[in-house]
Image: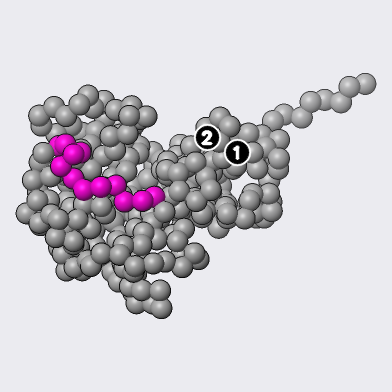
Amino acid sequence: MNQPVQPACDPQTWKLTLAYDGTDFQGWQVQPGLLTIQGELQAALYRITGESPLPQGSGRTDAGVHALAQVASFQLHAPIPPENLHRALNRTLPPSIHISEAKTVRSTAFHARHSAISKTYEYRVLRASDCSPFLARYVYACPWPLDFDSLQSSARLFVGKHDFFSFAATDPDFSHRNLAEEEEPGDTPIAGAPPGPKRGTVRTIFSSSWGQQSSDAGDLLIYRVRGNGFLHHMVRNLVGTMIDVARGHLSLDDIPRILAARRRSEAGPTAPARGLFLHSVEYPSGDL
């Protein structure tokens, strides 16, 4: 006699917090035939549970970008205790990806990207003419003299609600809708740079500042920026522009002009991916 089929468990919504060294990955988002964080996480979940949900990240970090506390969400039917999934993932994933927390959340509507209310990024610049191989994967080594006060003053000019079109990527491999790292409800596609702000490139920056630490390797400059969302390459373009100010290639008065221009060509270069870290993500307490 056939055994009765056991009813499937109701799916549970999971929230993972993870750190990774992005150097050897082609970014977060799964891509056929390429090594990605999302792809490795999905494969690990399948090996552990037999299910292969596509984990949704709080942000789609680019190739070479790191994370100190990325957040991912997905649903599983498997009735696995959080501590068991946490331990199994860290045994299964490559050592360059580490799960710091695995938990189920109360709200079935929780989504790592859509539920986020703010994110914080860090960018690390080493003020030195050369760089140790043990640091080279995680900093942008700048051999030029940089005026720290100019960096700090330029960072303050980005606080508030602005149209950051001039600081969005113009990579031809990305569609205009993908200018945004994440789309917000009501976002409209950007077609070129029409006059006047479009909601799709308007973001609010809550804090923006530089710090510095001295070490044997040189002065480490750390830019930290917290906002309600970020455009594709936005933080790296902000850093490249501020470095141009600190080198004397641009003035502080150029920052408002660049914001108003809504042209990527007006801003500074894109800083390398290796210095960028997703630092943390915040959510409403009711979702967790």
How far apart marks 1 and 2 lie (CA) works out to: 9 Å
The chief SS type of the magenta part is loop
- Judging from the image, what secondary structure is the residue with disc 2 in? loop
User: In the image, 78: left or right of 96?
Assistant: right
Residue occupying image coordinates x 10% and y 32%: 196
Residue occupying image coordinates x 45% and y 61%: 136
- Judging from the image, what secondary structure is the residue with disc 1 in? helix
Residue occupying image coordinates x 20% and y 26%: 192
172, above or below 40, in the image: above
49, above or below 134, in the image: above
Label annotation for residue 30 = 2
> Where, quadrant-wise, is the N terminus in this rendering?
top right
For disc 1, the marked residue is: 42
On the image, the x and y values in percent for residue 287 come to 43, 46
Locate residue 45: give its quadrant: top right
Dot 2, how many residues are within 10 Å of its Cα: few (below 14), some (14-19), or many (20+)?
Answer: some
Q: Is residue 282 visible?
A: no
On the image, the x and y values in percent for residue 247 come to 18, 61
User: In the image, 63: left or right of 124?
Assistant: right
Residue at the extreme top of the image, as rendered: 1
Numbered range of the magenta stretch: 262-273
Residue occupying image coordinates x 36% and y 59%: 140
Locate residue 230: give its quadrant: top left
On the image, the x and y values in percent for residue 190 come to 23, 27
Q: Earlier in the sequence, mark 1 or mark 2?
A: 2
Locate residue 111: give its quadrant: top left
